[in-house]
Amino acid sequence: MPTCHKGFAVLERLQSRWEGLLEDDNYSPVHEALMVGLKNMQKWYRKTDEMSIYFVSHGMILALFFIDIPHS
């Protein structure tokens, strides 16, 4: 079974985590590195919008959660 849908979820979770770290003063020494990493991640994540695999993987999520697929 394809697992691209899991990869998108991981990227979204990682992005949220890094954005949260930007608000934490304990991570101020690496603030600039987090910003650069987020910018790069967003660049590549936006490129997935142009790919058919993005549509297919999100369709797979819907199929897994909302369609009762009989098992053999």
Image: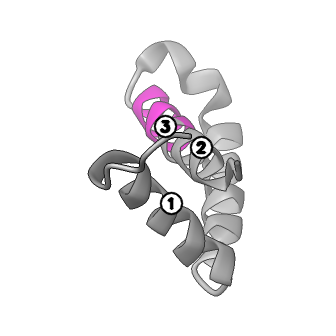
Could you tell me which secondary element the residue under label 2 belongs to?
helix
Q: Earlier in the sequence, mark 3 or mark 2?
A: 2
Single out the mark in the foreground, 2 or 1.
1
Report whether 6 appears left or right of 36. left
Label 3 neighbour load within 10 Å: few <14, some 14-19, many 20+? few
Quadrant of residue 47 within the rendered picture: bottom right
Check disc 2 and give the amino acid type: Lys
- State the colouring used for the structure image: one colour
Report whether 51 appears left or right of 11. right
Measuring from the top left, give residue 14's x and y in whole percent.
56, 36
Q: Pick the quarter of the image with the C terminus.
A: top right
In this rendering, the answer to whether 47 lies above or below 72 is below
Query: Which residue is tagged 3?
Result: 13
Rendered residue at 63%/87% (across/down): 50
Label 1 neighbour load within 10 Å: few <14, some 14-19, many 20+? some
Between 21 and 44, which is closer to the camera in this rendering? 44
Check disc 3 and give the amino acid type: Arg
Give the numbered dot on residue 60.
1
In this rendering, the answer to whether 63 lies above or below 64 is below
